[in-house]
Image (cartoon, helix red, strand yellow):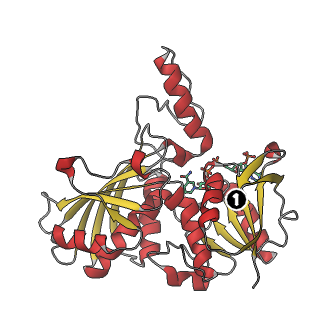
Amino acid sequence: MSGLKIGVVGATGMVGREYLSILEQSRLEIDRLRLFASQRSVGRQLPFHGDQLPVEEFTVEAARGLDVAFLSVSTELAREYAPKLAAAGTLVIDDSSAFRLADDVPLVVPEVNPEDVRHHRGIIAGPNCSTAQMVVVLAPLHRANGLRRVVVDTYQAASGAGKAAMDELIEHTRETLAGHSPEPRAHPHSLAFNLFPAVDSFRDDGYSNEEWKMLAETRKIMHLSDLCLSATCVRVPVPIGHSEAVHLEFDQPMDPRDARRLLEAAPGVVVVDDPRNGLYPQPALAAGRDPVYVGRIRADSSRPGGIALWIVADNVRKGAALNAVQIAELVFGTGRR
Ligand SMILES: NC(=O)c1ccc[n+]([C@@H]2O[C@H](COP(=O)([O-])OP(=O)(O)OC[C@H]3O[C@@H](n4cnc5c(N)ncnc54)[C@H](OP(=O)(O)O)[C@@H]3O)[C@@H](O)[C@H]2O)c1
């Protein structure tokens, strides 16, 4: 195949804009890149390789002829558009939750289950951002010693809820410092100088849908249908970068030194773990970078043989746009730089 005709749908959003810098560094052979968003964004231009690319209004008809569409819109719009794009012959790589658990849609994190891309029928999904960074760390440990149970508490950045939510954090921080009490619009509560254990809507069993997605998506990606996992997802006043405190149990006791050795050799993972010298993963250091950072690797004092650790990654990159570009690189066999 000569160069690819690629579209980013939702190009003006939090994730959409990140695609541009990631595609600039990708080995995908790009013949033409087209940017789509809603009618509101027509007239805007976004930079790519020194040029300014126009934002076009998305319609299925306008996007006809694309080889690949990175679909980065709401779940509702993805549900409507992805099957139509796929039916027109475009490979859709979807960031939303619309198809993640569908039997005929692979849910892929290339460091974990690259072989699953082979079974696609026109749509491939990327996971929820909290799940993506976590499974990159769980997979190499599980390959060495079967994973039985995961307890994870997340500290999720405002940008995980989209650009409007990140902008609201900045605006509310300014307004609160000025003595005002701003009204939340993009978040359920003001996030300035605050946090809340509510990411996505709540289910009858008391978990939020974000927490439930972490369970269901981890099971699917890791091919571990019986994995025990309990998540508590918390939104924190950080612009970019999700953090996770994770406790793990395995078939056999795991020595933290073995866990560290396995993680140091794992693709996509960088170990930062010298806490006495102030070295541990932090969202401000992970923002704008590709790796999943892990540190605070230690024996779980509450469970002999268990491991506790701390995972941080850029939710917009590995949590969405980078993962999707890696999927395209897998499909088209180009690998990463
Ligand atoms: N943010 C994250 O960390 C993250 C991580 C993993 C997955 N995801 C998923 O990725 C998707 C995008 O999230 P986001 O955070 O980037 O959201 P966002 O910042 O709110 O961006 C939404 C994008 O959708 C576009 N859009 C809205 N209506 C449209 C229409 N009718 N036709 C075409 N485009 C339309 C918007 O364009 P306008 O600017 O023109 O309105 C904007 O570009 C969501 O499904 C989300 O769940 C996000």
Of 196 and 334, the residue lying toward us: 334
Q: Residue 51 falls in which quadrant of the image?
A: bottom right
- Considering every residue shown, the one lying at the far top of the view is 179
Identify the element where label 1 is drawn: loop
Q: Residue 126 falls in which quadrant of the image?
A: bottom right
- Considering every residue shown, the one lying at the far front of the view is 50
Residue type at numbered disc 1? His
Residue position for label 1: 49
Q: Could you tell me residue 120's position as x and y percent?
A: 63, 81
Q: Is mark 1 within 8 Å of ligand 1?
A: no
Side (left or right) of 280 relative to 318: left
Residue located at (57% from left, 81% from top): 117
Side (left or right) of 64 relative to 170: right
Image quarter in which the N terminus is found: bottom right
In the image, residue 82 sits, relative to residue 153, either above or below, namely: below
Residue located at (80% from left, 52% from top): 55
Q: Could you tell me residue 233's position as x and y percent?
A: 40, 49
Q: Residue 324 falls in which quadrant of the image?
A: bottom right
Of 48 and 200, the residue lying toward us: 48
Residue 10 visible, this orientation: no
Side (left or right) of 232 relative to 316: left
Residue located at (62% from left, 81% from top): 331
In the image, residue 94 sits, relative to residue 156, either above or below, namely: below
Q: Could you tell me residue 95's position as x and y percent?
A: 60, 61
Label 1 packing within 10 angstroms: few (<14), some (14-19), many (20+): few
In the image, residue 327 sits, relative to residue 37, either above or below, namely: below
Residue located at (23% from left, 68% from top): 260
